[in-house]
Image (cartoon, rainbow, N blue to C red):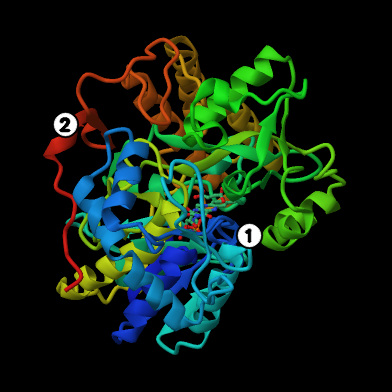
Amino acid sequence: MQFNVAAKYDVVIVGSGISGLICALELAKRGKSVCVLAKEAITEGSSLYAQGGIAVPLGEGDSVEKHLEDTIKAGAGLTDIDVAREIISNSSLSLDCLISYGVRFDITEQNKIHLTKEAAHSVSRVCHVGGDASGKYITKVLVDRVCRDSNISISQGSQVVSLITNEYGDVVGVLVEDVTRNHYVLLASDVILATGGIGQIFENTTNPKVSTGDGVAMAYSIGAELQDIEMIQFHPTVLLDFGDPFLISEAVRGEGGKLRNIRGQYFAKNYHPEGELAPRDILSRAILFELERTNSTRVFLDVSGLDRRYFKSRFPSIYQTCIDRKVDVFEAGIPVAPAAHYFVGGIKSKLDGSTKIRHLWSVGECSSNGFHGANRLASNSLLECIVAPHFLVNQLLKTPDKHLTNLTNIDIELDPGEYDEPQILKMKSELKSKNSKSLGLIRTKSTLLEHLNCLNTLKENIDVEKLSLNTQIQELKNMILLSSLICQAAINRENSIGVHYREDYPGSPEDLKHSIICKNGGLYCIPHTSITVIGANLT
Ligand code: FAD
Ligand code: SIN
């Protein structure tokens, strides 16, 4: 089928989270014409819901080296140390940049940025805005700026359904479906994927509806490499009752919240000396064991030891949500359980966002540059989202512009299959439920193999290789494709490391390896030390 070329830009950015918006502002500042595409409203994405804040080593006695040490420890040996050092070394410059955009961080009585503690950080180093509404306030400031920039066009309710490549395999644009179900092509010298996480492939997730992994699936489909995609982080404390899953920030535990089981027993210290502030994967699994042991579905976050007035002012959104959902915060505690939270793996890229495909870049949660290793340290994601765009923009500006064709139409082959809406919804919910059972916190070969069989049947019933113009179906195809790739990578990694826990192989790996999966090369491993991932520097 033929699609009209609607416009040409220097750069098309798919995704309007914090990473995409910072790329847009920095490119526009340097004279590039930019179009930002967002699947729903410009504000919608994980960035909006970020609570804890941004990890930056600003406190007394803290240093880049200390932050690096904590990041490497959390990453369980798979962190790319050079990348991590670059990101952390540039953290306070990037924070200043956010401040220059207009972000006002919460401060202490001494007029210093207030720093809080989160799991696996050896000191307090998480800066926040609006108490527990960091993402909301940062997003608001960035959106205001982007909307006022004449070099930036914004297209909301516009789902990118495919990347378009030329005869050399270089990316030349995107195919978009807008809210009125019109389809059109945007051509661009460069395309940046900033599509965020994949949490929606699971039943319970902190991620919003837009986080279905489209960017990762689209990149894979045109030959990009995916790295360590079996690494999915679960957050230990999510309120799952009386509405959509709602995160209860780690900062609540950082400020003294304790976990009790249904029998009223505190248990976290039985599993790890750091107790409530143990690394997320350990605490999440501890909660699962405790739920099984006590035959229950929730544990309780007890904040009765915290001053009530302080809690209300430090965590206003959490407090209000609990009140709205009739949760008796201070007496009964907040009922919580783990839920899928963060995609540690992603599109393999250098720190400068470049991928194996020319003119295709990736940034933020959808990319994997080695910063998070096998497990992300709390509040290091927003840090990456504010630092990495600067590296990307610097490198993109050094890359010669591609000559854009004068094409006015693009021909794309489509899936002729017909699927009805109730059928799609049913398949989506079955997929989520099966993913939760097999790709969750505890994995075994038998359940993974069984799951892969189901996914293969699904892939036959709904041709994931071919493009569908109904975005609901295309989204489902992306979710099935991604689930099957994750399942293959999880089967292949026969050891336990970071967030990937195999009950049948509980031991750590003998050799540290990254798993790579690529349409033309299949699934293979590369030794941890052989990767060079920095790319451009900031000068
Ligand atoms: P997102 O903010 O997720 O944005 C993705 C964008 O891509 C959206 O605009 C979406 O519409 C768009 N998109 C997706 N697919 C398509 C498509 N096909 N076509 C067009 N557009 C598309 N990290 C921290 O460091 N600190 C925290 O305190 C913190 N708290 C968190 C709390 C919650 C509840 C969650 C869910 C995550 C939290 N994280 C936190 C993680 C962090 O917020 C995310 O990793 C980060 O915000 C991701 O930003 P991003 O720019 O990569 O993508
Ligand atoms: C939280 O506030 O607990 C989320 C922080 C993060 O995911 O980094």
Q: Nearer the viewer, residue 142 or 103?
A: 103
Q: Is residue 181 above or below residue 428?
A: below
| Label 2 packing within 10 angstroms: few (<14), some (14-19), many (20+) | few
- Pinpoint residue 165: horizontal percent, then vertical percent: 28, 58
- State the mark number for residue 337: none
Specify whether residue 79 is in view: yes
- Pinpoint residue 120: horizontal percent, then vertical percent: 44, 41
Q: Is residue 526 left or right of residue 142?
A: left
| Amino acid carrying mark 2 in the image | Pro
Q: Secondary structure at mark 2?
A: strand
Q: Is residue 371 above or below residue 29?
A: above
- Does the numbered disc 1 mark a residue whose Cβ is under 8 Å from ligand 2? yes
The residue that disc 1 covers is 132
x 57%, y 64%: residue = 134
x 42%, y 64%: residue = 19
- Does the numbered disc 2 mark a residue whose Cβ is under 8 Å from ligand 1? no
Which residue sits furthest right?
Answer: 326
| Amino acid carrying mark 1 in the image | Asp
x 67%, y 26%: residue = 266
Q: Is residue 260 left or right of residue 139?
A: right
- State the mark number for residue 527: 2
Q: Is residue 503 above or below residue 10?
A: above
Q: Nearer the viewer, residue 516 or 222?
A: 516
Q: Quadrant of the C terminus?
A: bottom left
| Label 1 packing within 10 angstroms: few (<14), some (14-19), many (20+) | many
Specify whether residue 353 is in view: no
- Pinpoint residue 63: horizontal percent, then vertical percent: 31, 57
- Pinpoint residue 195: horizontal percent, then vertical percent: 45, 56
x 43%, y 50%: residue = 123
Point out the tag, 2 or 1, that comes first from the N-terminus.
1
Q: Nearer the viewer, residue 114 or 48?
A: 114
Task: Measure how far apart labels 2 and 1 are at the Cα level.
Answer: 39 Å
